[in-house]
Image (cartoon, rainbow, N blue to C red):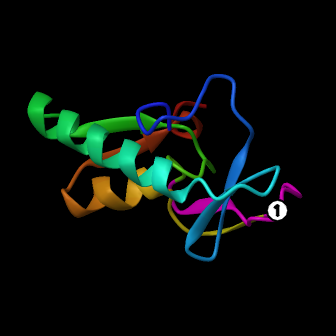
Amino acid sequence: EVSGGLPIPRFPSEIKKDKVINSIGKDVTFEFKLGTQKEIDRVKEFGATKAILKSKSPSCGVNIIYDGTFSGNTISGDGVFVKELKKIGIEILTELDFK
C-alpha cells in the first residue's frame, strides 16, 4: 500500500467488487495495484518462496477478506497482493498460522 503511494497513517480500505475503496469512499485501487507490482518485483528479485502477511487485509488477506462494508464481516477472497503472489507460486502464511 505504501509502495503504491498511500500515506502512513491511512484510512482503512476494503475490497468491494473489483475496486479497493477506503473508509471515506475514495477509490484507491490504482495505489494498491501499483504497490503490488512494485513488491512482486522485489519478491522476484530476492527469490522469496514464502510470505507472512496480515489476514483479512485488502492487500494481504488469504482466502478471507473483509466484505467491503466496513462492518467487520468477512467473505471468501484474497487481497490484491496475495492474488499476484499465488500466481507466481509463493507460499503464503498469516499471523493466524502462528497461534
Front-lying residue, 57 or 41: 41
* Residue sitting nearer the eye, 82 or 16: 16
Q: On the rendered structure, is 12 left or right of 70? A: left
Q: Residue at x 48, y 47 (%)?
A: 31
Q: Three-letter amino acid code at disc 1?
A: Asn
Q: Is residue 67 above or below residue 4?
A: below
- The single residue placed furthest to the right in the displayed view is 71
* Residue closest to the eye, 18 or 31: 31
Q: Is residue 54 above or below residue 71?
A: above
Magenta span main SS: loop
Q: Residue furthest top?
A: 8
Task: Reply yes or no: does residue 63 show up in magenta.
Answer: yes
- Residue occupying the point 82% across, 50% down: 24
Looking at the picture, how far across and down is residue 1, in whole percent?
50, 38
Q: Quadrant of residue 12?
A: top right
Spot occupied by residue 78 in the image (x, y as percentages of width and height): 50, 62
- Which residues fall within the magenta stretch? 62-73
Q: Label 1: state its secondary structure.
A: loop
Instruction: Work out whether 72 lies above or below 51.
Output: below
Mark 1 closeness class: few <14, some 14–19, many ≥20 residues within 10 Å: few
Q: What is the quadrant of the C terminus in the image? A: top right
Whether residue 35 is in magenta: the answer is no
Residue 9: give x, y in percent of width and height: 69, 24
Image-based side of 87 in relation to 92, left or right: left
Q: Does residue 12 appear to the left or right of 93 in the view shown?
A: right
| Residue on which the image places disc 1 | 73
Residue drawn at the location 61% of the way across and 47% of the way down = 57
